[in-house]
Image: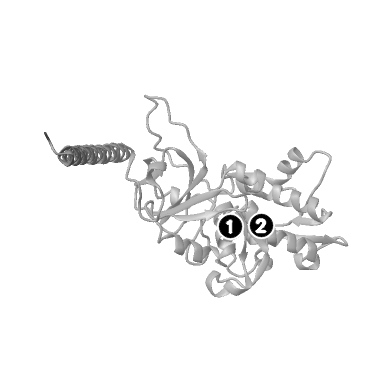
């Protein structure tokens, strides 16, 4: 007959053995879970790597992710246009001074008659005055100047601003020689003009009407204009202070020149540092972002230009052209078979810029 304690010991032993079996089973189960988790993590990492590789391949098809200067290159698709030495002499950034001679034909197609433009766009109103009926100005610059002076009249409550002298023909250069500032050769471009204040049958400097003078100087860049001959730049421009003469260069360029206190000579020199892969970024008062770069031209030269953004090209009359990209103006791709545009647009600024004063 078995001792009662033996049965108890047997049951205790069995219970301990079952516990050990359970622990071994639990340990194996946890090991399987760990293995499965590790496998799952490896699979996840492999999937991420595959996605990254596919993304990189896709990105390289459209272009590298980043180019020098910090601009996303996949957002700019590149093509090219061919510019010539003649194109270097066209556009709103052309220099005309003692070291960069410039001559525009009296009958150049870019010129528009100021009196006719005002009569067409302001029937029954006269937001600004003219010193004569036979003055001409570059058409793009004239549209910007008209918007500039019209808004000035509305803001200041006076139409006393006189658009006095703009493009000078060959004959007018002789007629007005005695009254022109020495070395002020910007009159030959057609992109600038004198602004004066009317009073008592005569014209006076802008400073005689402080409200008008302040408004014009504060807002000029929004319309693409700069004071061509500021007092502190006489040693660079070669012209003594003449703050009545406003020159059209285009909104982004006027914005940067004003913000950095640069005259046109200094600005053109600055732009020679920038290329299509290292572009100057400018944000206009409207919030529009522009990217600007320079290209030297020697004979017929291929210039890199975007195919998916609006852009303009202006000559400098100093050995190269300046490309200005409007990053707010996306261009839809051309239909297949339409070919590549190889004609340079040598204007600067856009109609939308000048009309809206952006």
Name the element at disc 1.
helix
Q: Residue at x 53, y 60 (%)?
A: 96
Residue 167 in sight: no
Which colouring convention does the figure follow?
A: one colour
Q: Residue at x 51, y 59 (%)?
A: 95
Residue 228: x and y, percent?
Answer: 61, 63
Quick one: 242 or 28, which is closer to the camera?
28
Q: Residue at x 54, y 75 (%)?
A: 235
Q: Left or right? Give the position of 34 relative to 172.
A: left
Mark 1: few/some/many CA within 10 Å (<14, 14-19, 20+): many
Quick one: 82 or 332, which is closer to the camera?
332
Q: Left or right? Give the position of 311 relative to 157.
A: left
Q: Residue furthest front?
A: 1
Task: Verify CB contact (< 8 Å) between mark 1 and mark 2.
Answer: yes
Q: Residue furthest right?
A: 200
Quick one: 148 or 297, which is closer to the camera?
148
Residue 202 position (above or below residue 313):
below
User: From mark 1 to mark 2, how far is it between C-alphas?
Assistant: 8 Å
Q: Earlier along the polypeptide chain: callout 1 or callout 2? A: 2
Rendered image quadrant of residue 320:
bottom left
Residue 158: x and y, percent?
Answer: 83, 55
- Residue holding disc 1: 254
Mark 2: few/some/many CA within 10 Å (<14, 14-19, 20+): many
Q: How many marks?
A: 2
Residue 276 tag number: none
- Residue holding disc 2: 220
């Amino acid at each position: 007959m078995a001792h009662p304690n033996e049965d108890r010991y047997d049951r205790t032993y069995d219970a301990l053995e079952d516990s050990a079996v359970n622990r071994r089973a639990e340990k194996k189960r946890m090991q399987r879970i760990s293995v499965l988790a590790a496998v799952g993590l490896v699979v996840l990492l492999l999937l991420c790597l595959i996605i990254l590789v596919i993304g990189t391949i896709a990105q390289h098809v459209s272009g590298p992710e980043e180019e020098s200067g910090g601009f996303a290159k996949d957002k700019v698709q590149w093509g090219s246009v061919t510019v010539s030495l003649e194109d270097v002499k066209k556009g709103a950034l052309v220099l005309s001074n003692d070291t960069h001679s410039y001559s525009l034909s009296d009958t150049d197609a870019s010129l528009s008659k100021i009196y006719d433009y005002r009569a067409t766009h302001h029937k029954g109103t006269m937001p600004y005055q003219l010193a004569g009926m036979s003055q001409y100005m570059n058409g793009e610059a004239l549209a910007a100047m008209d918007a500039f002076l019209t808004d000035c009249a509305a803001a200041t409550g006076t139409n006393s601003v006189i658009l006095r002298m703009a493009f000078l023909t060959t004959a007018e250069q002789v007629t007005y020689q005695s009254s022109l500032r020495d070395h002020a050769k910007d009159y030959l471009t057609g992109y600038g003009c004198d602004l004066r204040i009317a009073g008592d049958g005569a014209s006076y400097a802008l400073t005689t009407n402080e409200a008008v003078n302040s408004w014009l100087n504060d807002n000029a860049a929004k319309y693409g204009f700069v004071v061509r001959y500021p007092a502190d730049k006489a040693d660079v421009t070669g012209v003594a202070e003449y703050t009545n003469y406003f020159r059209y260069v285009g909104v982004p360029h006027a914005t940067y020149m004003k913000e950095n206190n640069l005259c046109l000579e200094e600005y053109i020199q600055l732009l020679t540092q920038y290329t299509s892969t290292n572009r100057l970024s400018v944000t206009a008062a409207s919030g529009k972002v522009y990217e600007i770069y320079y290209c030297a031209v020697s004979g017929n030269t291929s210039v890199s230009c975007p195919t998916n953004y609006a852009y303009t090209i202006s000559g400098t009359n100093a050995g190269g052209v300046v490309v200005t990209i409007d990053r707010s103006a996306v261009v839809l791709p051309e239909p297949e078979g339409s070919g590549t545009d190889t004609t340079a647009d040598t204007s600067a600024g856009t109609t939308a810029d000048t009309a809206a004063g952006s």
